[in-house]
């Protein structure tokens, strides 16, 4: 995919119309018209493009670069940070990285700490597939180097923001605890070192590090809420630093934590209040919060509202196959359609999610997708295949180095197998099976909505 094609695929009708108004002649017009034909599909192979346009690869790339710059100047006339923000909002991370480096190299003004801090923020928020750890660290160092009075607080802020990013991204690795290289005790030791200081930003990101550790490495909703409250207590000391409404962001984090703790009603109230007031797309963790709100709506059986939210937020990500955001959206669509009984649509989005996750593999998503696939075939009443899948998935989890992290998933697949066997043998679920269902439904409502209860109800109806 060319950079010009990447941009064009994300544009709306008004933006396309503005590009068509650019006066182009010769090969520039030929290349533009050719790329525009493929707005809603993939470009052909490079050899085919060069043959069709009767052009060399060097000339083709040069024209692409010229057209891309003309497109930027037409759509975002002010350029600078406005262009960077525009590319971020379009989720064009490769273009954003390229433009950031271009501005650093070609700007006629003296670069200052604000440029590098903004660049650091853009880079550190890149999804897993696009994240460039080395470049992010370089921008962090340049921010400190360009700051007139860089002090320990600034250095600690960069250190702990990078650490926060590292903890979150390492969770995507196949052996996350080993890859991380430190434990919660190391983080708690650092908390003690900071607790009597006024390095508020460092404290804030360290508390977020601890929340992430208890989210991905050592599950504890109680600890997540405890440290989130510590982060919230710093709100007034750190608000000046953030380009977003940090109070609103922390409210969303608190709603996320309440959902994880199975406090569905209170979390929905917060989500509704915040989203009704308007959440900008530059909000940190925007897609994650949207996904969580959609899950709450599905749990509350507000299916139409959930679908409207998913259509607005995640369909563009899915259309452009934007890595982890597209996978999140496709999985959420799958949960919606499994919940409301639209199995054909559920399978469609399940296959999309599997396809995207195969290319940018994220183990927690892979395990989720295996569960959703098992549930799909259960609801489709293909019970023999359900048993085969469950057995295969248990073997998969047991083959992982960090099997203990997924021990509950063995319980999930045994639960699904037991209920499938119950139907095949025309036997009502035992008390132990019902107890397992209650345990899983309570613990995993935040992830699988009401799907375990739906399995239970289908079993009862089939064995009545």
Image: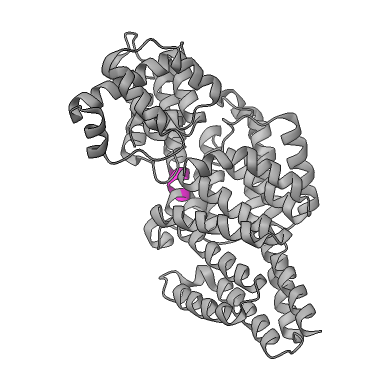
Give 201 or 321, whichever is nearer the viewer: 321
Q: Position of residue 204 (x, y in %)?
A: 56, 38
For the point 60% across and 80% down, the residue is: 414
Quadrant of the snapshot with the C terminus: bottom right
Q: Position of residue 271 (x, y in %)?
A: 73, 41
- Magenta segment, prevailing SS (helix, strand or loop): helix
- From this viewpoint, is residue 80 visible? yes
Task: Decide whether residue 424 is among the magenta residues.
Answer: no
407 with respect to 424 (left or right)? left
Q: Is residue 402 above or below residue 35?
A: below
Q: Position of residue 382 (x, y in %)?
A: 61, 77
Task: Decide whether residue 164 is among the magenta residues.
Answer: yes
Quadrant of the rendered image containing residue 260: bottom right
Give 333 or 430, whichever is nearer the viewer: 333
Q: Which residues are magenta?
A: 163-168
Give 47 or 256, whichever is nearer the viewer: 47
- From this viewpoint, is residue 152 visible? no
For the point 56% across and 76% down, the residue is: 410
For the point 78% across and 54% down, the residue is: 301
Q: Position of residue 376 (x, y in %)?
A: 61, 67
Quadrant of the snapshot with the N terminus: top left
210 with respect to 339 (left or right)? left
For the point 74% across and 73% down, the residue is: 438
Give 80 or 14, whichever is nearer the viewer: 14
Quadrant of the rendered image containing residue 315: top right
Quadrant of the rendered image containing residue 233: top right
Q: Is residue 332 above or below residue 276?
A: below
């Amino acid at each position: 995919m060319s950079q010009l094609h990447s941009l064009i695929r994300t544009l709306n009708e008004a933006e396309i119309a503005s590009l068509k108004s650019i006066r182009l002649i010769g090969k520039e017009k030929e290349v533009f018209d050719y790329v525009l034909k493929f707005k809603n599909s993939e470009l052909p192979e490079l050899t085919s493009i060069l043959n069709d346009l009767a052009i060399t690869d060097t000339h083709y790339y040069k024209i692409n670069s010229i057209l891309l710059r003309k497109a930027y100047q037409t759509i975002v006339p002010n350029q600078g940070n406005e262009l960077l923000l525009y590319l971020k909002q379009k989720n064009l991370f490769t273009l954003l990285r390229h433009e950031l480096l271009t501005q650093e190299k070609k700007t006629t003004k003296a670069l200052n700490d604000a440029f590098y801090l903004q660049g650091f923020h853009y880079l550190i928020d890149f999804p897993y597939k696009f994240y460039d750890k080395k470049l992010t660290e370089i921008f962090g160092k340049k921010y400190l180097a360009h700051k007139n009075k860089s002090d320990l607080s600034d250095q600690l802020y960069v250190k702990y923001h990078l650490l926060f990013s590292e903890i979150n991204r390492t969770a995507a690795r196949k052996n996350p605890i080993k890859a991380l290289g430190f434990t919660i005790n190391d983080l708690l030791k650092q908390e003690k070192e900071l607790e009597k200081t006024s390095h508020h930003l460092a404290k804030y990101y360290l508390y977020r590090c601890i929340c992430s550790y208890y989210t991905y490495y050592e599950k504890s909703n109680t600890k997540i809420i405890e440290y989130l409250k510590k982060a919230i207590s710093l709100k007034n000391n750190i608000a000046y630093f953030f380009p977003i409404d940090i109070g609103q962001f922390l409210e969303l984090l608190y709603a996320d934590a309440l959902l994880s703790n199975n406090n569905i009603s209170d979390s929905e109230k917060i989500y509704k209040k915040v989203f009704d007031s308007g959440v900008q797309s530059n909000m940190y963790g925007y897609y994650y919060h949207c996904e969580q709100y959609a899950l709450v709506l599905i749990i509350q059986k507000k299916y139409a509202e959930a679908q409207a939210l998913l259509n607005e937020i995640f369909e563009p990500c899915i259309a452009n196959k934007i890595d982890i955001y597209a996978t999140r959206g496709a999985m959420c669509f799958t949960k919606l359609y499994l919940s409301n009984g639209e199995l054909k649509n559920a399978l469609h989005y399940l296959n999309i999610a599997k396809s995207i996750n195969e290319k940018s593999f994220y183990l927690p998503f892979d395990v989720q997708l295996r569960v959703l696939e098992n549930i799909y075939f259960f609801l489709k009443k293909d019970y023999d295949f359900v048993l085969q899948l469950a057995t295969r998935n248990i073997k998969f989890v047991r083959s992982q180095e960090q099997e203990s992290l997924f021990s509950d998933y063995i319980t999930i697949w045994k639960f699904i197998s037991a209920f499938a066997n119950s139907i095949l043998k025309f036997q009502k679920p035992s008390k132990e099976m019902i107890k397992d269902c209650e345990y899983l439904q309570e613990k995993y409502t935040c992830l699988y909505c009401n799907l375990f209860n739906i399995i239970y109800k289908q079993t009862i109806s089939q064995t009545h």
